[in-house]
Amino acid sequence: MDREKLYEHVSQADVVISLLPPSCHLIIADSCIELKKHLVTASYVDDSMSKLDGKAKVSGITILGEMGLDPGIDHMMAMKMINDAKSRNGKIKSFTSYCGGLPSPAAANNPLAYKFSWSPAGAIRAGRNPATYKLNGEIIHVNGEDLYDSAAKFRIPDLPAFALECLPNRDSLIYGNLYGIELEASTIFRGTLRYEGFGEIMGTLARLGLFDLASHLCLNQEKGPTYRTFLHDLLKAHSTGSTNDAVKGEKELAERILSNGYCKKRETATKTAKTIIFLGLLEPTEIPLTCKSAFDVACLRMEERLVYSNNEQDMVLLHHELEVEFPDDQPIEKHTGTLLEFGKTEKGKATTAMALTVGIPVAIGALLLLENKIERRGVLRPIEPEVYEPALNLLQAHGIRIQEKIINQC
């Protein structure tokens, strides 16, 4: 990054918005501190950014991070719901949060029921992260290689048409401390939403070796193999029977997947075979020489095949559930908050739901700083009332509405 040009651009602004990759934020934050300019990002506040808190305060600026969808709107919804309950002397017994960027039902028209609006590499890596959460007082750890297999069926009562599943999302325990509920909540869980069946297919593909990062011998020749040859090579590497039988179609591929032990159910093997064929991994097309690992091959095929067409919409679904206990034997209440947003097309221009739900909160953060409505200085997340209260109001004014509901559970 050209530091001189960066400083030139930053010096001309009152508030800087960075939507660059997270690795770029630190140098931008340093320039904002030096030039006394506020900064807003949609990315997670990591340790390196947190350490700038003191310098930002001395400079008199605010670095507002996690001002997107997840993280971002999820924080704002959570803090509003938690603080509303506590204002009535409620204790949070359970906090669960679920979020997913998905194709709309009409666009979920492939065997994986998923499409990418961003890099498949990042999404696949995220699906291999270990996870930790608390369930009924017990701390649960999920290894990264087991994450896809931990997917659990999930339904939202008010949205019965959505057949969903959730996968644990990284370390949920830090949110207990962040939201001030770590001592009272026996369950703290954050999950990623996908359509049902996603986890079993991705887990099977992982065991087949399609997400391996290591350099693969047959991909490092003067001439690349075909996708069909490469898939056969993967199957042979794990085969317990004859290695000379070429797989020609869905039925044979499903049988090989099942017999090699990549999955336990025939239904899963069939779904995985359909996915492999849809991705073109049985085609006699030569693999580009830029692919050096199975992971590279999988990412390339997903980037080419799991994409939105011009008339298709994506969807964002964010759902919080709180169980709240009150004194004097009052009934336990279940509080829910749901955000459902679809991509929009106006005047021939399409905007994804993901772009709306990340871009609008970032813009709102910048607006609040421009209008001096955020007085706190240092490195912040949108968990303070002076941030989330006006931000939620502005989100609603821009058509992003959260449906809240309270149910007595007796």
Image: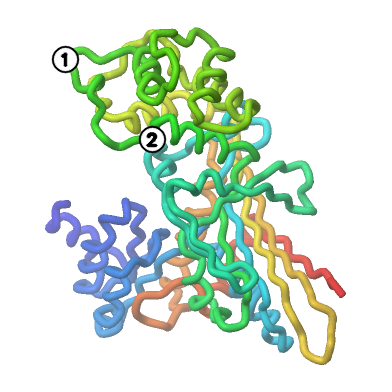
Answer with mark 1 or mark 2, whichever residue precedes in sequence: 2
* Residue 320 in picture, x, y percent from top left: 65, 63
**In the displayed structure, would residue 48 be above or below residue 239?**
below
Q: Residue at x 32, y 51 (%)?
A: 21
Q: Residue furthest front?
A: 241
Q: Quadrant of residue 113?
A: top right
Viewer-nearest residue: 279 or 368: 279
**In the displayed structure, would residue 328 be above or below residue 95?**
below
Viewer-nearest residue: 124 or 24: 124
- Quick check: marks 1 and 2 in contact, CB under 8 Å? no
Disc 1, SS: loop
Viewer-nearest residue: 183 or 192: 183
Q: Residue at x 36, y 75 (%)?
A: 379
For the residue carrying disc 1, how many other residues have a C-alpha within 10 Å: few (<14), some (14-19), or many (20+)? Answer: few
Q: Which mark is residue 222?
A: 1
* Residue 325 in picture, x, y percent from top left: 74, 81
Cα distance in 3D space between marks 1 and 2: 23 Å
Left or right of residue 107, residue 126 in this image: left
Instruction: Identify the residue under disc 2.
Output: 211
